[in-house]
Image (spheres, rainbow, N blue to C red):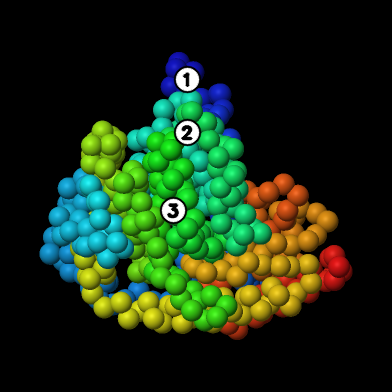
């Protein structure tokens, strides 16, 4: 009798799908090592996560007010799947300011992360592929792994200021390649593409019928070159109005609200060519109901309202980039292409062990957290690490002193 009322327990282990085995997110995976160190009572200096709100950057108050007002005004139900009309209108205005003249569609998503997921999912069939940069922002390979799509990465060339290596793109193209990802300004290298480079990529896209995914989430965070000149960001879709392109943009970085999860896609190119694909994206947009609703009311005030915060953000980033670059240039075993956008530096390091060991031991011994280059992909035989230079100058100086001591103590000054 008692046996009949015993709860039935499931004996077999529940395993995750095999296709997830290659999904890595090195940036957050290091958290376990940091936890170890924190439990021992040390404070870790976090140069690993690209969240400006962890540091001395504040969301512009008028943007917060707009989202707050929307909540108070009862905009708390589901939104239309593509986004609320006034936000779509503002994004079209932004596309025009970026010089994109052939806009066919715009839509709002829960962060650029969702744009990436939807746009790739709506395009690739099993057996096809998408070219992604190496090193890359790891979400791209994670989404491709999730879909069971084999990775096909093209090199960014460190010797050429981390520009895409055109010969490698040509080598990697197959008859089944459907698109190419271009991250500009780039995470993790901080590089910026030249107009000539964009034109050359457009030419390849035309010849091979590729969709270009232009991830321009950092397009307002541009840093001066070594002469102190700031070249404005050039949108891929402005250079190649005829090429099927989705430009990714969002609020997380330019408007300092990464926790709100607001991003968007701007579809451009020839209307007839891109129609069926755009319909596929809309099928997925409807299936996931909508992006965050009240926050969408902040898109128009953000894009069309005062941009003063950007002056302050750029001033801080410039000073922190310069400090970072000077440190890289004066530290044995380290060299670095000067970042020209976003808030990342990707120094190369000459050490006799893997950059993953370097990074983990650095956390354990000096309590400084950066991310290993192998977490983003890199050319075999090279080692790198990614620095997020968002912290203030005092914190960066302390962190860099810790890294320099660690290198000297562990490897000697080379
Ligand atoms: C290149 C790049 N694309 C997309 C994202 C994701 O942005 P979101 O916060 O809009 O999802 C990030 C975030 O760091 C990024 O660096």
Q: CA distance from mark 1 to mark 2?
A: 62 Å
Looking at the picture, tell me which residue is in the foreground, 1 or 247. Answer: 247
Q: Residue at x 52, y 69 (%)?
A: 340
Q: Residues within 10 Å of mark 2 (few under 14, many from 20)?
A: some
Q: Where is the C terminus found, in terms of image quarters?
A: bottom right
The numbered mark, 2 or 3, whose residue comes first in the sequence reads 2
Residue 164 horizontal side relative to residue 281, left or right:
right
Q: Position of residue 70 (x, y in %)?
A: 17, 64
Name the residue at the left extreme: 73
Q: CA distance from mark 1 to mark 3?
A: 76 Å
Q: Which residue is mark 3?
A: 199
| Circles 1 and 2 in contact, beta carbons < 8 Å | no
| Circles 2 and 3 in contact, beta carbons < 8 Å | no
Looking at the picture, tell me which residue is in the foreground, 395 or 373. Answer: 373
Looking at the picture, tell me which residue is in the foreground, 267 or 70. Answer: 267
Quarter where residue 412 is shown: bottom right
Q: Position of residue 318 (x, y in %)?
A: 51, 79
């Amino acid at each position: 009798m008692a046996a009949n009322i015993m709860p039935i327990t499931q004996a077999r282990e529940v395993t995750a799908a095999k296709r997830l085995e290659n999904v890595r997110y090195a940036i957050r995976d290091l958290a376990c090592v940091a936890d170890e160190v924190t439990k021992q009572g040390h404070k870790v200096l976090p140069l690993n996560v690209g969240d400006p709100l962890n540091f001395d950057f504040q969301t512009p108050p008028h943007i917060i007010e707009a989202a707050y007002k929307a909540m108070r005004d009862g905009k708390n139900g589901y939104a239309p799947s593509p986004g609320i009309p006034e936000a779509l209108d503002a994004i079209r205005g932004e596309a025009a300011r970026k010089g994109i003249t052939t806009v066919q569609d715009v839509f709002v998503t829960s962060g650029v992360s969702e744009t990436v997921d939807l746009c790739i999912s709506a395009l690739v069939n099993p057996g096809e592929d998408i070219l992604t940069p190496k090193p890359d922002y790891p979400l791209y390979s994670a989404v491709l792994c999730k879909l069971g799509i084999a990775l096909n990465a093209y090199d960014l060339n460190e010797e050429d200021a981390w520009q895409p290596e055109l010969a490698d793109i040509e080598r990697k193209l197959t008859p089944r390649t459907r698109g190419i990802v271009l991250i500009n300004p780039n995470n993790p290298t901080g590089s910026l593409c030249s107009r000539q480079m964009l034109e050359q990529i457009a030419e390849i896209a035309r010849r091979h019928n590729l969709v270009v995914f232009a991830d321009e989430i950092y397009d307002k965070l541009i840093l001066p070159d070594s002469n102190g000149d700031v070249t404005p960001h050039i949108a891929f879709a402005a250079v190649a109005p005829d090429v099927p392109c989705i430009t990714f943009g969002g609020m997380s970085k330019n408007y300092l609200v990464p926790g709100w999860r607001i991003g968007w896609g701007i579809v451009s190119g020839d209307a007839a060519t891109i129609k069926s694909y755009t319909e596929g994206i809309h099928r997925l947009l409807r299936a996931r109901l909508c992006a965050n609703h009240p926050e969408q009311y902040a898109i128009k005030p953000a894009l069309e309202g005062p941009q003063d915060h950007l002056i302050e953000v750029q001033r801080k980033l410039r000073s922190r980039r310069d400090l970072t670059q000077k440190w890289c240039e004066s530290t044995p075993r380290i060299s670095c292409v000067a970042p020209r956008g976003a808030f990342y530096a990707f120094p190369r390091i000459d050490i006799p062990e893997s950059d993953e060991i370097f990074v983990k031991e650095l956390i354990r011994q000096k309590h400084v957290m950066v991310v290993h280059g192998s977490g983003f992909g890199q050319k075999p035989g090279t080692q790198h690490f990614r620095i997020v230079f968002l912290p203030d100058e005092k914190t960066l100086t302390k962190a860099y002193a810790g890294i320099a001591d660690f290198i000297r103590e562990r490897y000697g000054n080379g």
